[in-house]
Amino acid sequence: MRLMCAESLSDLSQFRVTLFVGPQPVKGKPFTHATVFNVKKRSWKGGIQVAVELTQAQSDHLNSAIGFSQWLSEALETVSAAERSHCEDRARELFIQALSWCKLDLLLQSGITQENQCLTADTFVAELNEVAEKKRDFVASYVAQELDLLPNDATS
């Protein structure tokens, strides 16, 4: 499984974080998805799960803000037409996962208790908007790696 955002590793080396599942629709919250992570701090005897929620509106806003759709279109130029639709669908899921990693980083930097928890969609909204633009290379490389695109496609 994947570890934390590379830029965050030095600041957050006390945590081991792995993707558990997601994104999945949140019951009772239309147009909201949750990605669940396992989080273990070195000093804890056991780990916890953190569900990170994002709304479709947040995802769409950040997609536009960091130019993800344009990047994806260029990155998939060499992919066959038969595979392109599958890659586009998977890329949307991976995009939400990458944003969720970044939102989880914000929680870890602000402090976390050793209990299962949910970062609701209305938490860290402004902070995620700011950090997503700074981590656009992380988002692109995360998606590119998971889709097995060539490494230099990730930085286009």
Image: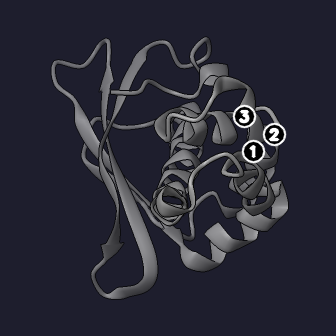
- The residue located at (25%, 47%) in the rendering is 116
Q: Is residue 152 above or below residue 50?
A: above
Which quadrant: the C terminus? top right
Note whether 38 is above or below 76 in the view shown.
above
Tell me the distance, in whole angstroms, between the alpha carbons under discs 3 and 1.
22 Å
Counting from the top left corner in percent of width and height, residue 8 is at: 62, 23
Q: What kind of residue is marked 3?
A: Asp
Residue count near mark 3 (Cα–Cα under 10 Å), binned few <14, some 14–19, many ≥20: some
Location of residue 35 (image quadrant): bottom left
Measure the alpha-carbon separation of dots 1 and 2.
5 Å
Please identify the quarter of the rendering in which residue 34 is found.
bottom left
Whether residue 123 sits left or right of residue 65 in the image: it is left
Q: Amino acid at mark 2?
A: Lys
**Which residue is under mark 2?**
134
Give yes or no for contact between labels 2 and 3 (Cβ–Cβ under 8 Å): no
Task: Choose the circle earlier in sequence order: 3 or 1.
Answer: 1
Residue annotated with mark 3: 153
The residue mark sitting in front, 3 or 1, is 3
Q: Residue at x 16, y 25 (%)?
A: 46
Residue 66 in percent (x, y) is at: 81, 54
Pointers 3 and 1 in contact (CB under 8 A)? no
User: SS at mark 1?
Assistant: helix
Find disc 1 in the rendering and name its residue: 131
Left or right of 125 on screen, residue 4: left
Residue ID at (76%, 42%): 136
Q: Nearer the viewer, mark 2 or mark 3?
A: 3
- The amino acid type of the residue labelled 1 equals Val
Q: Residues within 10 Å of mark 1 (few under 14, many from 20)?
A: some
- Tell which circle, 2 or 3, labels the residue nearer the N-terminal end: 2
